[in-house]
Amino acid sequence: MDATVGVDLSSLRVIGAAVTPAVMVSACGILATGLDNQIGRMTSRMREMLREWRSLPEGEPRREVLRAEVAILDRRHLLLARALGMAYGALISFVMTSLLYLTQRRFSVPEVLPVVAFSVGVVLLGCIAVFALASLRLGRDAIALEKREMFMDTRLPAPTGEARD
């Protein structure tokens, strides 16, 4: 009876070790979809702003605000594009974790390899969070630019990276 319980627990560990990365793969897919949607919205917004910029006469003050906002959006786009690449890297790491764990006994895969693959995925997810937070900060900078223009108030704080008056 103890041998049967041992086999059942061993099987449960194998299933658990294979399923945990699968859940993380699903999470990475959802994260990648969200990042891709944000990138798409930013691209559309940038096109709108460029269209507006082109329609304004030379010397129009709004053109400078649009130029600064496009620069911010460009930096945000780059951050999120890198985060999207990391999401796919994490996804691959979690798939590799499952494959390595499931083939471990059959092909004598060192026990540390699935752990390393999983750890790489977790680190990439942490990096994605840092990039997303940096993108949020830049988004606040774009809003600050709009507020400065809307209220014509140079006393409002300048966005990060913008020269102060």
Image (cartoon, rainbow, N blue to C red):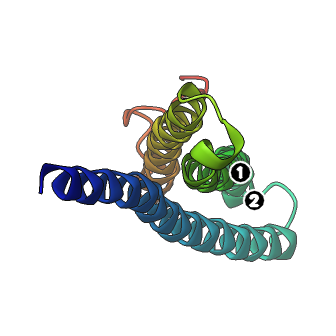
- The answer to whether residue 159 is visible is no
Q: Which residue is drawn at 37% across and 37% down?
A: 156
Q: Foreground: 79 or 108?
A: 108
Above/below status of 33 relative to 127: below
Which numbered disc flags the more N-terminal residue, 2 or 1? 2
Occupied quadrant, residue 57: bottom right
The residue labelled by disc 2 is 60
Image location of residue 59, percent across then percent down: 82, 54
Q: Which residue is drawn at 75% across and 51% down?
A: 67
Which of pointers 2 and 1 indicates the residue nearer the eye? 1
The residue labelled by disc 1 is 85
For the image, the number of numbered tags is 2
Above/below status of 82 relative to 37: above
Image location of residue 64, percent across then percent down: 72, 49
Relative side of 25 to 6, left or right: right
Circle 2 Cα neighbour tier, 10 Å, few/some/many (<14 / 14–19 / ≥20): few
Secondary structure beneath dot 2 equals: loop
